Image (tube, helix red, strand yellow):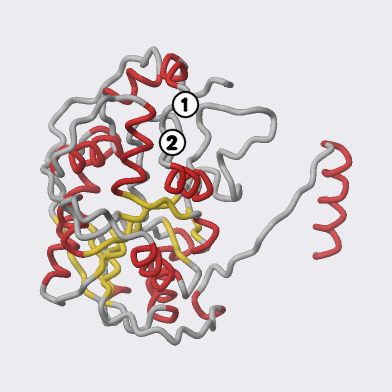
């Protein structure tokens, strides 16, 4: 089988004139035997969303976390209509939420309700940190929580700001030119900051059907992750100018963007076999993700004077 795969890859490389790599992750927790010396008793992992039954993905994710984060508190925040029989004996906290009547644009209200309830449940555990993730994603690196904590220590937030610390997200779905577009999938931070981020009320707007003329119009619509981050920033007393310069400055002031490769984050959805969904070598595109190298450069330079504001007139799929 291995020789057949290698032969196929070699043919594909020559035919398409590319280099093809792949990385195999174990699907089931029984194959994971990584040791973690850290004691994460001060951290709650809030896993929110519907149960992914295919290949027992959510179940095996929790079993994986029990192995690689043995001291962390695990909270599964899902829905009252889910079958939870296989989860009862895992020793985790189960939350069966009632779905909001209106799911919101791209089901944003489902995410808000399940995440917020999970964080509120963690308050009784007196944890210091919250790691928020999803039922269709899995972190494989057993050092991920320690890494996130180290980032909070290395890059403390300015003492003039209201939060206790930064909120850490990943480059996966954090886009350079979509204003205030902080990925909402995997987030880490101090308990009180994460509670503040998700305690914003549901989005009561009806779904927006029309096509946005450009990235500025899309951003001003405050959809999904932009709805979350802009509400948080305004709660922190920030006035948004809706420019790339201001968006990047807020990334530096309030957030830290870590590369998903460091925590070995896998997303069991959409193009699940494609490691980097938005990476492109044939020029620069509007859907380019904001990576740690971009964040660090701006953090050090504090130079927001030469931002390409003209790109706000382009579409999400456009080539730059």
Taking the image as shown, residue 268 lies to the left or right of residue 209, namely right
1 and 2 marks in contact (CB < 8 Å): yes
- Kindly indicate the quadrant of the structure image that contains residue 208: top left
Q: Is residue 125 above or below residue 278?
A: below
Percent coordinates x, y for residue 37 in the rendering: 44, 87
Residue plotted at (87% across, 54% down): 7
Badge 1 local density, few (<14 within 10 Å), some, or many (20+)? few
Nearer to us in this view, 164 or 66: 164
Residue plotted at (41% across, 19% down): 312
Q: Is residue 158 above or below residue 286?
A: below
Badge 2 local density, few (<14 within 10 Å), some, or many (20+)? few
Nearer to us in this view, 217 or 150: 150
Dot 1 falls on a residue whose secondary structure is loop
- Kindly indicate the quadrant of the structure image that contains residue 147: bottom left
Percent coordinates x, y for residue 106 in the rendering: 30, 35
Label at residue 303: 2
Label at residue 222: none
- Kindly indicate the quadrant of the structure image that contains residue 212: top left
Taking the image as shown, residue 271 lies to the left or right of residue 164, namely right
How many numbered dots are placed on residues in this image?
2
Regarding residue 96, the answer to whether it shows in the image is no
Percent coordinates x, y for residue 159 in the rendering: 21, 56
Residue plotted at (44% across, 37% down): 175
Residue identifier under label 1: 306
């Amino acid at each position: 089988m291995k020789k057949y795969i290698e032969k196929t890859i070699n043919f594909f490389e020559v035919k398409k004139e590319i280099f093809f790599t792949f990385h195999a992750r174990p699907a089931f927790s029984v194959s994971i035997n990584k040791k973690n010396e850290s004691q994460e008793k001060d951290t709650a992992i809030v896993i929110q969303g519907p149960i992914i039954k295919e290949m027992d993905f959510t179940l095996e994710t929790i079993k994986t976390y029990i192995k690689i984060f043995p001291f962390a508190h695990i909270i599964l925040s899902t829905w009252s209509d889910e079958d939870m029989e296989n989860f009862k004996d895992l020793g985790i906290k189960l939350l069966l939420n009632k779905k909001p009547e209106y799911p919101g644009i791209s089901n944003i209200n489902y995410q808000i309700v399940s995440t917020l309830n999970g964080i509120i449940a963690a308050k009784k555990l007196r944890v210091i940190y919250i790691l928020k993730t999803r039922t269709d994603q899995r972190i494989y690196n057993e050092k991920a929580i320690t890494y996130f904590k180290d980032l909070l220590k290395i890059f403390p937030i300015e003492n003039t700001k209201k939060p206790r610390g930064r909120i850490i997200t990943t480059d996966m779905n954090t886009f350079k030119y979509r204003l205030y577009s902080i990925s909402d999938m995997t987030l880490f931070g101090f308990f009180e900051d994460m509670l503040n981020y998700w305690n914003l009320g549901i989005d009561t707007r009806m779904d927006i059907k029309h096509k946005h003329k450009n990235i500025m119009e899309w951003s001003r619509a405050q959809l999904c992750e932009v709805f979350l981050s802009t509400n948080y920033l305004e709660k922190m007393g920030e006035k948004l100018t809706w420019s790339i310069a201001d968006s990047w400055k807020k990334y530096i002031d309030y957030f830290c963007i870590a590369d998903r490769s460091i925590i070995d984050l896998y997303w069991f959805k959409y193009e699940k076999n494609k490691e980097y969904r938005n990476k492109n070598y044939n020029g620069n595109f509007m859907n380019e993700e904001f990576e740690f190298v971009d964040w660090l450069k701006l953090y050090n330079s504090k130079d927001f004077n030469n931002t390409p504001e003209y790109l706000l007139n382009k579409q999400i799929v456009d080539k730059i």
